[in-house]
Image (cartoon, rainbow, N blue to C red):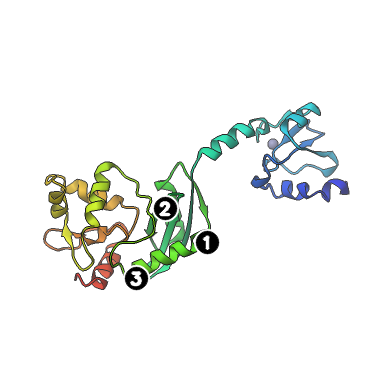
Amino acid sequence: MNSTITNDPRWRRMRKRDTNADGTFFYSVKTSGVYCLPSCKSRPANPENVAFHPSSEEARQAGFRPCKRCKPDQFEQQKGKYAMRETIQYMTRESSLGLTLVALSDKGVCAILMDDSVHTLTTDLKARFPEAIVKHNDAALRETADAVCSFIDQPKGRFTEKLDVRGTEFQRRVWEQLLRVPAGKTASYTEVAMALGAPNAVRAVAGACAANALAVVIPCHRVVKSDGALSGYRWGVERKRRLLEAEGAR
Ligand SMILES: [Zn+2]
């Protein structure tokens, strides 16, 4: 056993395939003649054959070829691409309406989603932000999630945390209109469409309500059918009924 290598902290990071170590060092394998990123998925090398290199350049100068699997020579470019992607952090916790996911971009709260399953919630979040790096982070989200859950418990007035609202121009106009419907009141899809000066856009209004990523904070639950029937709700009609009851609208 080559204890110099196995006692090197880089050895442990490489054995853990730690992606955070990528770019901080490279390792080469004498028997295969290749060098790799610490996170390379290839099978573990014998420590006797391993050497560490501070850069891709130095591994090449020592006579090693870049591994075809982890492409360590392209890492710097990939890192550039990775850095361009936005990061969205989230946590899940219980509110009075059940399991709630709260997500934060660097501009503000970008998603409030509700479902009984953490898996469904995170899948939904990733589908809504397909370009983003989505990360679970309880510590960063705790205060925001507390504010969101208190608001869900008592949705009076406007939510005061900064929001990152994303949608088409029409969707944003619909959502802005929904914010004018106070707690305890409801509006029909037709009334919302009329208020926007687009009386024929009832279906599009319903579509915008269904696309709302900020449950309760943008009160799409206050939109009902013209006959007062609850109609659908992206997060389940039972949650809609409970919300409207709590607000005194039913
Ligand atoms: Zn590799």
Question: What amino acid is labelled 3 in the image?
Answer: Asp
Q: Secondary structure at mark 1?
A: helix
- Front tag of 3 and 2: 2
Q: Which residue is mark 3?
A: 153
Name the residue at 14% across, 51% down: 195
Question: What amino acid is labelled 2 in the image?
Answer: Gly
Q: Is residue 237 above or below residue 71?
A: below
Name the residue at 25% across, 52% down: 176
Going from N to C along the chain, the mark reached first, 1 or 2, is: 2
Q: Do the numbered discs 3 and 2 sit on residues whose CB atoms are within 8 Å?
A: no
Q: Secondary structure at mark 3?
A: helix
Q: Is residue 62 left or right of residue 66?
A: right
Q: Position of residue 237 (x, y in %)?
A: 27, 63
Q: Is residue 65 above or below residue 243?
A: above
| Disc 2: residue Cβ within 8 A of ligand 1's nearest atom | no
Going from N to C along the chain, the mark reached first, 3 or 2, is: 2
Q: Residues within 10 Å of mark 3 (few under 14, many from 20)?
A: some
Q: Which residue is mark 2?
A: 108
Quarter of the render that holds ligand 1: top right
Q: Which residue is mark 1?
A: 138
